[in-house]
Amino acid sequence: MSNNPTPITVAYGDGIGPEIMDATLRIIQAAGANIAPEIIEIGEKVYLRGNSAGIEPEAWESLRRTKVFLKAPITTPQGGGFKSLNVTTRKMLGLFANIRPCAAYTPYVDSKHPKMDVVIIRENEEDLYAGIEHQQTPEVVQCLKLISVPGTEKIIRYAFEYARQYGRKKVTCFTKDNIMKQTDGLFHKIFDEIAAEYPDLENEHWIVDIGAAKLADTPEQFDVVVMPNLYGDILSDVAAQIAGSVGLAGSANIGAEVAMFEAIHGSAPRRAGQNLANPSGLLLGAVQMLVHIGQPEVAQKVHNAWLRTLEDGIHTYDIFKEAVSKSKVGTREFADAVIERLGQTPSQLKPADYSKAKEAIQVKLKEKPEQKMATIGVDVFLHHNNRNADALGQAIEGIQTKHLHLSMITNRGVKVYPNGLPETFCTDHWRCRFKSEPQAEVNYEEILNLLTQINQAGFQIIKTENLCTIDGVPAFSAGQGA
Ligand code: NAD
């Protein structure tokens, strides 16, 4: 460890935030953490001063300078107009990986899954969280799901590197690629490609619905689990809760430059200022931070003293149980008890071991050969009020260009023309697929020509999507029932 303290940006947050941050900093500094905290203000007060992001420009400067953020929970004021500080911070600072270890601490903390020890690694920037939503017609609203090659490669490489560094045995991937063959299909494909580079680690893929059911039922079968943003958001809370309590879980948000560490719970305003809150979630976030800044021996000391404190039955109100607990303590007394046990290890629970985690995980993207992309058609989306698919099909069939001809019409993805079923319900949102058959490359002039004809025929175009091949392979989904 270098002698210069590592600057870190610290936010005390709202509600129980200041109490649990105070406890956390006291414990890690008593353990010898070599840090120089810079305090910034975020959250409720900043929002209420009229800053809709909840963070001031000077705070960004501190974060970009220290590149390490230890953050207590904040209160998002009720009412519209306030943007989620977490989503903003993750995206502005490129924090692509969200890491949530979820372990059981039975018999000291109740859990139905005493052997559970899972790490959920959630992609943090893409998927439906790109926040690109549009009302397209009076009846239909759209949210764009974006999955990128570099975004997926980063998170999956991170998961395998994490598993190696932390002595884990298996990496599991959850997707829904039986339905979303392009987006989730890409995530799964890249998972399989990268898994082959880590023969020392087991790998497996589950469709997310049955995977989630198994995770809730037999979490001890899982080790590291990596998944796209939405599934990860939902399942990391499920995993933390079934491990024992969301109040015990810490979380890391990792980017190429900056990283943010926090508890997964919120600011619990009703418990604020009463010396009641459990500081464990934030403390375990800080343990991940210490590993990240190259102080794994301090991380290990803190984690083991904390496990020993749980074993000794010194518990805050949220995990206190007459049968196993010895004394019910407040936030400050809990911190004192952890500090007293620095240097001790647990006697029953598995001790923490960060000896392999020497430095922050760096993910390097692989150079990819350039791919040839060719446009071979276009999906034209229309707003059209008449629910009769055949009438629309017949009206639009005659519109064509040299290469582009109508191949089908779908409504909410289901083929309704030609040869649709009368039972299929149709909204006012139609997709008309025009393809070059036999497959030939078309230029944008030709697409514009087609669109002009459709417009002149009196149809309302609401958007278009090009149909492409990548290296000759069609890169778009077929219509359902087509
Ligand atoms: P919450 O997690 O703050 O609290 C839910 C309940 O869990 C509390 O009433 C309390 O009984 C218990 N609890 C939570 N943390 C605890 C702890 N450390 N020790 C003991 N008990 C604890 O969730 P909420 O009530 O839905 O949200 C309160 C505020 O927190 C909201 O403004 C919300 O927007 C915000 N929030 C912030 C973050 C964040 O900053 N990362 C995350 C979630 C929620």
Image: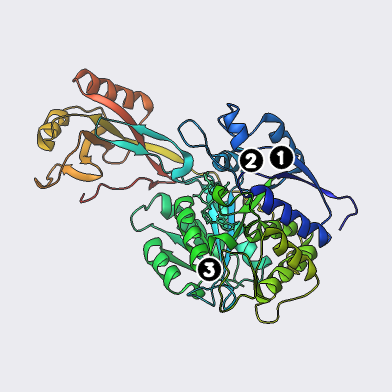
Left-right relation of 442 to 85: left
Residue on which the image places disc 2: 93
Q: Residue 229 appears at what percent x and percent y? A: 49, 51
- Of mark 1 and mark 2, the one earlier in the sequence is 1
Q: Within 10 Å of the Cα at label 3, are there few (<14), some (14-19), or many (20+) other Cα atoms?
A: many
Judging from the image, the colouring scheme is: rainbow
- Most extreme residue toward the bottom, as rendered? 348
Is residue 235 depicted above or below 405 in this figure? below
Residue on which the image places disc 1: 63
Q: Are marks 1 and 2 in contact (CB under 8 Å)?
A: yes
The part of the image, by quadrant, that contains residue 40 is: top right
Label 1 vs label 2: CA separation? Answer: 9 Å
Quadrant for the N terminus in the image? bottom right
- Of mark 3 and mark 2, the one earlier in the sequence is 2
Q: Residue 245 appears at what percent x and percent y? A: 53, 64
Is residue 254 depicted above or below 249 in this figure? above
